Each structure stands twice: as structure tokens, then as C-alpha cells.
Amino acid sequence: MTTNPELILEVAEIHTFIGQFHILEGVSVSVPQGSITVLLGRNGAGKTTTLKSIMGLTPPRSGTITFGGRRIEGKRPFDVAKMGIGYVPEHRAIFKELSVKENLQIAERARGDLNQRADFIFELFPDLKRLYGLGGGKLSGGQQQMLAIARALVPDNRLLLIDEPSEGLAPVIIESLIQAIRRLAQNTTVLLVEQNFRMASQLADRYIIIDDGKSVKTGEMSTLIKDEATIQKYLGAA
Amino acid sequence: MEGIFAPERRSTLIAVLIIFVGLLGFSFLTTGADMAQLSITLLSGLLQGMLLFLVASGLSIIFGLMDVLNFAQGAFFMIGAYIGWEIQHAPNLMKAIPDPNLRFLVGIAGAVIVGAVLGAGLERGLLRPLYARPIFQLVATFGVSLIALEVVKLIWGTAPRSWTEDFTLSSGEFSLFGQFFSTYRLVVIVVGVLLIVGIAVLLKRTRIGITIRAGVEDSSMVEALGINVRLVFTGVFVLGCAVASFGGVIAAPFLGASNAMGAEFLLGAIAAVVLGGLGSYEGTAIASLMVGIAKAVVAKFSVQYLNQPVWESLTPMILMAAILLLRPSGLFGKE
């Protein structure tokens, strides 16, 4: 059970295998309620697998995951999602054959979810209102990313897991994404994976560095920004 | 069905239209420009196409969503036919339900229920543990089709059963270009059209349809949105098997019930699914009609000029091979 009631998510020492490969070799993540926490690390460090393990898409073999005081490791992804965790995967994974409207409708957990949240979603992403009837495959990369985040906002999720939202996007689009994530984080806790350190530093309150399948460092983002040695050692960027 | 009417599909649609017109034109010319003969060929082709669609639609949706090529689909068609035949002809049931129309309706309900229950059992008991092993699934469904055939032989024997107990629709007739046709033939065609439209509406306009289409693209993401995809898989599999059983029972008044009908319709249905483009429901519907009409045209021609009825059963595969040579992903499949 959660030791700290202020933590909405607590991942403790999880080990995850994909096939025969031992990808996570002891990752621990603590996400305080109402925060934006970012997972940092080099390519292949295990950040995406950490999010997938939380969602139950690559279930951990050992360790515990506690969300809102309830253990969720071993649960199937649809059960995890229904508990109030929204997932925005890397490469967006929007449904290209469905329209924007259908992409949002499919995320409804109860009839009327979309109607209730439509104003908020279109305020964050006004383009989606204009593109409502268009096929998902016809959207630009930035529009697809907005749709993927909007889809996670349709149900009343308490935690959003967002994987690499800036990947492949132009700087101007990234800027509007930063604004949108800041807005939505006023009501929802966010756990973010982000390679773009500039974006991560602008958004996050806290960080966790994952290196070679292990969580190696955690703390306040404001401290990390000043810690050039750590940035150089684990992220290779300053 | 906006998918097949999208601008990028226009050339395919024109090609499909040319094939249909070409087939019917060929039949018209080779039967002495006789409208009566053409109407026989057309109605026979539409009927065969609709029956093929009832097997192929399940095959297509199940493959699209679950990547399972269900070789037992033909067996469900055969079982539906035998159950319909049994309920219509069993002496005890004839006493209990003297009205043949009502017995036929009970037969339809019985076949659909048995198809659905067997489909649920097959998916949950045999296929679910094998989702990570597609080749094993293929072998498992093939094995089930063989077992189903042997069970049918055990219960009903190997001799084909003819349909002798008429009901109002099967005994009624209508006239077209001086030829008389069974009203039931028209009813089956209309039911087929209604099913094509009904399933299209289900896929395009309902929440479950959106889920199925999304699941075809990325079932893991659907699950991560809070939807129990395994339950959707079971539902789709059951629907496919129930529709195939329904096809069997409504085909039985024409075809009777026989051991060979399952394999025969399965081959035609596989040809239709591949021809239409794997996973494309609309493509499967159009290809089923194309295969049905091609079979009817070739049957007429080969009996009249070649005295070789075998060409009819070869037609689906020849048509499929010809189209795949020109378009390897089928008519409406993705490149």
C-alpha cells in the first residue's frame, strides 16, 4: 500500500522482461498528487517500458505498483485504465481509420463523457474542433499528438502518462503543447517521458532519471537544471 | 461505407464495375442475347454471392480484428444447414410444431444459437490460449472443422439430405422475363443485402463498431483506453460463427444439407475475403457478389458449351489468382 498519501503513484523496484530481455532491473518512481513528473534518460534506458509496465501492457515480473492506494501490478490494461489512468503512447497511436470524433468517442468510459469534456478539450486544442470529421490518418504530426492527448482527457482520469509528446514536432507546435500540458496539469497529475530536455525543464516539477533499466536519481526539476554534471552524465545534454 | 467511395478508390470501383458488366455481358452474349437466361444467371449469381457473403463476412471481420483465419467457418455453415434441416424434417418436431413456417423460424433460431454457443466455446477454449501463436490457431481451426465434419457424419451420415418440407416462401413463385423463380430466392437475396447493410451500420455507426475498427488497427491501444478487448474478440468471433450458421440454415431449402457444403463454401469465402482485400468488410461484400456472379456465369457457359461443370468450382480460385496478379493486396486491401 502507498506509504505516503500525497503520492498518487508509487512504483517500487519493478523488474520487467520483454521476451528474454531484462529491460527494467529495479525501477522506482514516486509521483506526488498534482505534480508534473518527468522520466529522463537516454534512448533505450527503459522510460517507455516503465510507462507500459504501469499500464499493464508489459507487466512487471516483480516489484509493486500502487495507484491511489491500490495495487495495480498484474492487472490488465483495461482495468488499469478504468481506475483513472490515461495513456498517451509514443508515436501517438491514434486510430488512423477513425475520424477525430470517433477517436475521442472510443475513449468514453460512460456515455456523455465526451459531451461533458468537449469544451475543455476544444479550448486546449481548438484545431480539433475544426478537424472533427476528418480521418485520423489525414492529420499532421502535431494534430495527431493533440488528438492523442485529447483522447486521454475524455474520461475523468486522475493521472496521465504521456510518452515523448514532442517527438518529431516543429518548435512552434512544441510550444503550444507545453501550454496545453500546463493547462491540463491544473486538474490532473502528469507523468511524462521526454527526451527534449528544454521542454521537460519548462514543464516538470520533479524528475526521475532512468539509466540502463534502473532509476538512478530523483529530485526537484529546479535542482537538476543547475546540476550540469548530472545532466552530462545521464542525459548527454546541457 | 465511405471507405470504398473515397477518391483514391475510384479507379478500383470502376474496375469492379467493368468486371461485373463484363461478366453479365459475356453471359448475355453467350446465351443468345436472351434476357430470360440472363435473369436466371443474375439471380443465381446474386443468391450464391449472398450465401458466400454470410460465410465470408465472419471470416473477414474475425481476421481483421484477431488475425485469425478461421478454417472452421465453413463447418458452422454446414452445421447450420443440418440443424435447419433436422428441425424442419424431424418427425417429432413436425408433430410438435405442425406449421412449417414456424418450424423454419425455429430452425433459424436454433442454428444461430448453436453457432453462437459453439463459436464462444471455440474462441474461449481453444483460440484464446493460442493468440500468441497464429500458426497454431490456423491448425486448431482446421482441426475443429475436421472434427465437426466427423461429428456431422456420425449424427446424420454421409448421404446428402434433401429439403422436402416446403413452407410458404419456399413454395411461392414470381415471374421475370417469362421465367418463374422461387420467391424464397428473392427473400434470401434481400436478407443478404439487409445483412450487408446491417453489419456495415454496426461497424460504422455504433460504439461497438468503432471499437472493432479501432481494434483492427491497434488492439493494445484499445485495451489501454479501458476496453476489454478479449471480450470484444469473443463477441466478434461469436457473431461471425452465428452469421455463418444463419447462412447454412437459409441455404438449406435450396441446397439441402451435405458433408461437402462446408468445405465448398469455405473455399469460395476465402477467395472472396482475399479478393476483396484482407480485413476490408466492404471489399469482402463486393467480392462475394463478384465470385457468386462469376460462378453462375461460368456454370451456365460450361454446361452449355464445354459440358464440364467442374469449371464452376474452380472459378473462385481462378478469379482470385487473376486479380491478385494485378493487385496483390486485393481489390480494397491496403498496399
Image (cartoon, helix red, strand yellow):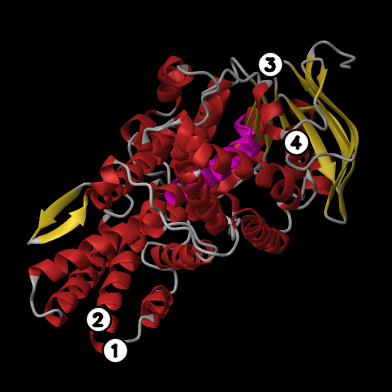
Q: Are marks 1 and 4 on the same chain?
A: no
Looking at the rendered structure, the secondary structure element under dot 2 is helix
Q: Which residues are magenta?
A: B224-247
| Label 1 vs 2, first from the N-terminus | 2
Chain letter of disc 4 in the image = A
In this rendering, the count of numbered labels is 4
Reply yes or no: does residue B230 show up in magenta.
yes
User: Which residue in the rendered view is the most extreme toward the top?
Assistant: A5
* Residue on which the image places disc 3: A34
The disc labelled 2 sits on which kind of residue?
Phe
Spatial distance from mark 4 to mark 2, Cα to Cα?
Answer: 59 Å
Residue B306 numbered mark, or none: 1
- For mark 2, what is the residue? B301
Identify which amino acid the numbered label 3 is placed on: Gly
Q: Are marks 4 and 2 in contact (CB under 8 Å)?
A: no
Is disc 4 in contact with disc 3, using a CB cutoff of under 8 Å?
A: no
Q: Residues within 10 Å of mark 1 (few under 14, many from 20)?
A: few
CA neighbours of label 2 inside 10 A, class few (<14), some (14 to 19), many (20+): many
